[in-house]
């Protein structure tokens, strides 16, 4: 082992006085000092000396720095910026893998050169990497990136907007944000905005006075008042009716509200976290969501990754969910079943994984979940992977490309949509409505081709050319869309072309079209 220059005695004494797990390391990642808290909780025991060892060796057992092994580490960023840098990191302690928030601060000598780095590690409450049946589970880089944003904004009162598909755990992330904030000891109040009718929204949110409407037999405080000192979580905020959004906007802008039937202005004292699975910018463009409200709640947006983008978390999540849905049962998931789960795409995300695990646990009588206990869709995903067709996804690559292209062509009319569809290799018939799946001309085997009806996808002519332009009967010269009832196309006239209304027939050259 290389000799490590001792840290200044004053710094070593300072480390022992500071709270939390703290170390000093040199530019080669070698620990030169560590306080007792680090040795006890983050090292390998209070009696084991970590001085002289690399930090990545102590925390992970690696033979190279964490950022070179696929882990997150702010050391390189601190060296480049010369300032303190933060990140969320998976640390391996005597208790197992756990999430910690790491802060690394570069220290300079009298000449201005960075000679030491001070590291402070703080374990995150309610979050764990692989420990089952506890809080949030995850160690995939996509999950850690999201969690890092959560821990950055949690200590503040900044409004947070959580964006993610259904089943990604938005309420759990909102609760984790609350528990890591300075308001953790106060209430966390969740409001399901999609379940509130227009007549009840104002009363539920702001409360009402006695006699303010029929059935109001007593004064009632609202959810905003219930969250005083804590956090108000508005789930599915995109479902709030447009007529009621102005009332929520006033609350956020001024912090003032009135109970229904009351005249006294009351001041709200709560932190706002909103969540939705909807595309709010598109709703704003469609004038279904107020733009001023959107920019108020969008102060700190956080995107939640879908489960298909967190492949490293599927195994730990499945084992954790198994303990949660069947407490007291020592069931396991065998290797084959786990490989099938890891090959599946989970369009319903963590919620779907929970349902699959719960169903399989009820079918498994021998204490082990096997492939035969999984749904057919999951088993087909594994078969597709075994045949070398890649991971089975609920949204095929072509379909994803179609959706992306159609989004880019929204509002541009049929001509623009056809142009976009041609670029990604699909043929559209008729006008495409927003959210509608286009018709796709699939490639057919050569043996099924005929002279007059070749697949448009294979034809070199662009879809908006005269070759594909439909005639008055609705068919282009290349075959076009199938006719209702499977009727054959009308016979082609030779030498003369039929004229439309008010248009005389014209002479044409009698030659065959090459296909």
Image (tube, rainbow, N blue to C red):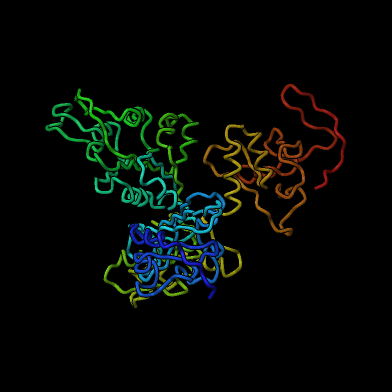
Q: Residue at x 26, y 36 (%)?
A: 224
How far across and how far down the image is residue 144, in percent? 46, 56
Q: Is residue 12 visible?
A: yes
Q: Quadrant of residue 258?
A: top left
How far across and how far down the image is residue 233, in percent? 32, 42
Instruction: Give the residue furthest to the bottom.
Output: 366
How far across and how far down the image is residue 222, in percent? 22, 36
Q: Quadrant of residue 297?
A: top left
Instruction: Give the residue furthest to the left.
Output: 217
How far across and how far down the image is residue 320, in percent? 36, 65
Q: Residue at x 40, y 69 (%)?
A: 43
Using residue 493 as the reference point, say whether residue 434 is left or right of it: left
Q: Nearer the viewer, residue 357 or 222?
A: 222
311 to 163, vertically: above or below = below
Q: Nearer the viewer, residue 317 or 41?
A: 41
Q: Residue at x 32, y 27 (%)?
A: 254
Using residue 105 as the reference point, say whether residue 470 is left or right of it: right
């Amino acid at each position: 082992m290389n000799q490590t220059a001792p840290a200044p005695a004053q710094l070593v004494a300072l480390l022992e006085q500071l709270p939390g797990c703290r170390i000093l390391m040199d530019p080669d990642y070698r620990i030169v000092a560590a306080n007792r808290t680090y040795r006890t909780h983050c090292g390998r025991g209070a009696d084991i000396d970590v001085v002289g060892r690399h930090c990545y060796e102590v925390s992970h057992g690696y033979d190279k720095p964490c950022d070179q092994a696929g882990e997150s580490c702010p050391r390189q960023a601190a060296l480049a910026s010369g300032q303190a840098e933060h990140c969320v990191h998976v640390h391996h302690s005597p208790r197992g893998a756990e999430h910690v928030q790491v802060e690394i601060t570069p220290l300079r000598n009298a000449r201005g050169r960075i000679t030491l780095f001070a590291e402070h590690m703080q374990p995150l409450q309610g979050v764990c990497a692989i420990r089952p049946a506890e809080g949030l589970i995850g160690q995939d880089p996509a999950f850690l990136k999201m969690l890092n944003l959560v821990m950055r904004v949690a200590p503040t009162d900044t409004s947070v907007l959580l964006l993610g598909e259904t089943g990604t755990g938005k309420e759990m992330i909102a609760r984790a944000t609350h528990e890591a904030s300075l308001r953790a000891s106060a209430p966390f109040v969740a409001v399901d905005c999609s379940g509130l009718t227009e007549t009840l929204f104002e009363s539920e949110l702001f409360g009402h006075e006695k006699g303010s409407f029929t059935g109001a037999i007593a004064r009632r405080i609202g959810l905003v008042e219930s969250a005083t000192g804590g956090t108000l979580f508005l789930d599915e905020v995109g479902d709030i009716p447009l007529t009621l959004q102005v009332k929520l906007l006033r609350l956020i802008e001024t912090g003032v509200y009135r109970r229904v039937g009351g005249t006294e202005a009351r001041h709200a004292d709560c932190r706002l976290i909103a969540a939705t699975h909807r595309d709010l910018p598109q709703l704003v463009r469609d004038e279904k969501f107020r733009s001023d409200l959107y920019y108020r709640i969008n102060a700190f947006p956080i995107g939640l990754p879908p489960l298909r983008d967190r492949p490293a978390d599927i195994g730990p999540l499945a084992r954790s969910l198994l303990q949660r849905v069947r407490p007291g049962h020592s069931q396991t998931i065998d290797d084959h079943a786990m490989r099938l789960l890891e090959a599946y795409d989970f369009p319903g995300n963590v919620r779907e994984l929970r349902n699959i695990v719960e169903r399989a646990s009820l079918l498994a009588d021998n204490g082990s979940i096997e492939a035969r206990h999984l749904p057919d869709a999951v088993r087909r995903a594994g078969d597709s992977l075994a045949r070398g067709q890649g991971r089975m996804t609920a949204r095929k690559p072509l379909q994803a490309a179609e959706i992306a292209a159609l989004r880019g062509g929204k509002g541009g009319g049929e001509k623009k949509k056809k142009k976009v569809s041609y670029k990604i290799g699909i043929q559209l018939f008729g006008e495409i409505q927003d959210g509608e799946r286009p018709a796709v001309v699939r490639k057919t085997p050569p043996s099924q081709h005929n002279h007059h009806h070749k697949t448009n996808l294979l034809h070199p002519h662009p879809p908006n050319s005269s070759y594909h332009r439909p005639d008055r009967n609705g068919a282009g010269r290349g075959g076009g869309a199938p006719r209702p009832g499977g009727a054959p196309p009308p016979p082609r006239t030779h030498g003369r072309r039929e004229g439309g209304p008010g248009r005389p027939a014209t002479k044409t050259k009698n030659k065959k079209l090459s296909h």
